[in-house]
Image (cartoon, coloured by chain):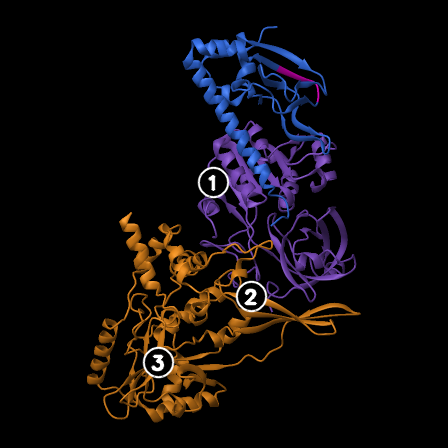
Chain colours: A orange, B purple, C blue
Amino acid sequence: MQTEVVLLQRLHLDLLLSQLQAAGYQTVGPVVRDQAIVYDRIQSTADLPMGIGDIQGKGSYRLRSRDDAALFGYVVGPQAWKKYLYPPRQLLMRAEQNSRGLQITAPDQEVPKYAMIGVRGCELKAIQIQDRVFLEGPYSDDFYRERREQIFILAVNCTEPGNTCFCVSMEAGPAAGPGYDLAITEMLETAEPCYLARAGSAKGAELLKHCNPSHAPATLLEKENALWTAAAAQMGRSLNPEQASAALKSGYESTHWKDVGERCLSCSNCTLVCPTCFCSGVQEVTDLAGTSSERWREWDSCFSLNFTLTAGRPIRQSPGARYRQWISHKLAFWQDQFDQSGCVGCGRCITWCPVGIDLTSEIEALNALQTKT
Amino acid sequence: MSPALLPEVWRISDFRWETPQTFSLSCEKPEVQTRVQTLNPFRPGQFNMLYVFGVGEVPISISGSPENTSAQIHTIRKVGAVTNALAELKPGQSLGIRGPFGSAWPLHKAKGKDLVIVAGGLGLAPVRPVIYAALAMRSEIRSLTLLYGARQHAEILYADELLSWQTGAEIAVHITLDQATQSWQGRVGVVTSLIQAQDLDADRTLALICGPEIMMRYSAHTFLEKGLKPEQIYVSLERNMQCAVGFCGHCQYGPHFICKDGPVFRYDKVQSLLNTREV
Amino acid sequence: MEIKEDAIRKQRHFKDLPTPYLQALIRCAHLQTFAAHDFVFKLGGKAEAFYLIQSGTVAIEMFSSQRGSVRIQTLHEGDLLGWSWLYPPYKWHFDAQALEESQILVFDAKAFLEQCETDHEMGYLIQRRFGQMMVERLQATRLQLLDFYGDQK
């Protein structure tokens, strides 16, 4: 069945947002804060970063003013949607110890219902990659599942990729793949942008119906197609996933890791901004009386020294070994573990690395070393 | 919430010191006593996550018999905050348990074979269940041998049980110590010398190895020298673990998660990783 | 008593020796019984023999007045004992004590070395076998040195 493409105006987007809110969704989307685009609660399109773009490079991110009224004219910022599905801190359990003995209870928490506005193709793919980790293994993570089951995804097809992007290499964009409820493409033909929209689920189709939209004219569809083609050709980076995986496996003991280790600060930025990184640690927090205790899960990073603490001693002691673990997991072992790459080509790890380490260049360097020998 | 994620409350039914630093906790589930539930069945080689109130969780392999339906035994060395806290527990007190998790020793492959189990130090604990299970199906296994290496006489685990096995005819038990005092009348030398001394029928042998990583590596080498293929050798690995269900990422070992793909691995799956630093 | 080739083939490294070499070994060997606590050789003694254990147990030990007798390794059926006869100063560096009644093939090292002088081919082969045994002992000792069962970090 051919998906119907309809034409929306900005007022329709506001209508969609209010309908979602009426249906009990917390609408979250891009806003400008601390000189960056981050994800937070939004009420209407007035909260969106209108006319704001960004300039990204290795270890560099700056907002810029656009000369149009684009609401989605930026490339992905430092945050990923994982913070809503897999929060940085999660209470796992409560324990009480008193005269009746030990009691352990699951946290009784209300599960927020999020409508995510402005999910890029790469980010949608990242959510699906985390689904595989948290839902499709031998065990399923209840906290993730409860949130995931009730999200609404409004995807925004990407037409202006950034300098650190390579989603085309990872088959994650620039247009959003399946899995969204609604997907829109922002068209900047006229002073006031308009939007081509497609429903990807019954929920999305139902919502669109209420907007009473008009059919998209064929000329606009052609232009949309041209935008995607142009976007795909404008990727600032590229990576061959098969080659990368092979290079990492054969170069596992390369001297190159020592070289990266001398540059890497082990700061964990790349793992925090990465939309697929899922590692966590647990903290036990007790009250002063010593009668109740809570167990919290917190985002952790394979770059922290104590991540591999085994029988009192960390196993990956050198920064180079920790970087090797991160990149090998992302681009090679993930394939063995989950039948897909752990990278979506969003470029965040390149942009937000304080010393500008670029995983695509590291793969090239590794390749060059191997072909030399 | 899934019982894999939320610990159940169990009770200590027995506490005993095995060596100066190592103790065994027998744990029973109150619900089993009241016949509400059966004890979580486990396969030899699997582990539980033990939770001490206010301190935290730690992965411990199950070291009792899989046929014991009233209690599960864990043999634990005092090495960190949680294991030190576990050592303070008394019979009657409670702890939290999640599990069992992980892969098991491939005992089904021992049918008609010579089963050689090599344990080093505390590594005897994770293989004791497979010894029990092998003894239970002894007639189906051609021969059963335990080779055990320990540091000192006082650090031999399950000494009484080893002695009773040694006096029986069902399992051949050979023990060697790294450091011997005058009280020790048995073998002295590294555990690989026990493997070396075995007259193995390489094609019909299944080897299970558990102990410190270096010990497993050299034991596996010795089996390879004796003509075994890597596919006939199994090892049990240990890494930092926080969730035990494949979410926390800590136990990753190359392409493997020790918690769900391991802890028991066929040797060829981890052979090259075992020879690599900082994996 | 006649010594059979099989008695020597018990030793892993001698298993595949050509028959003439086995005969050469047999020519300078005799079987000796050591009672429990008998010393096969003692620290500082002249190293004029090497040994192949047929049954029983022999411990390699070092004695000190502070620590008493420290047992380094025990040797058993099929194990070779002694290599100090190969190189100067031809003196034993440890004690070797039988821990139980042990049947041991004792080889006259001087006589054997004389045979090797006339047959370098054989000498080379036997040296290789002893070399391999020594490497194995060294590796085992290094592993013991690691003390890998301990708690030490």
* Labels 3 and 1 positioned on one and the same chain: no
Residue hosting label 3: A62
Name the subunit of mark 3: A
Dominant SS of magenta comes to strand
Graded by Cα atoms within 10 Å as few (under 14), some (14 to 19) or many (20 or more), the crowding at tag 3 reads: few
**C103 in magenta:** yes
Alpha carbons under labels 2 and 3: distance apart: 32 Å
Q: What stretch of residues is rendered in magenta?
A: C100-104
Q: Which residue is mark 1?
A: B231
**A363, above or below A36, in the image:** above
Please state which amino acid type lies under the numbered disc 2. Gly
Find residue A281 and name its label. 2
Of the pair C24 and A102, the residue shown nearer to us: C24
Q: Secondary structure at mark 1?
A: helix
Indicate the amino acid at tag 3.
Arg
Residue A212 visible here: no
Q: Chain of mark 1?
A: B
> Mark 2 vs mark 3: same chain?
yes
Q: Residue at x 66, y 27 (%)?
A: C61
Q: Secondary structure at mark 3?
A: strand
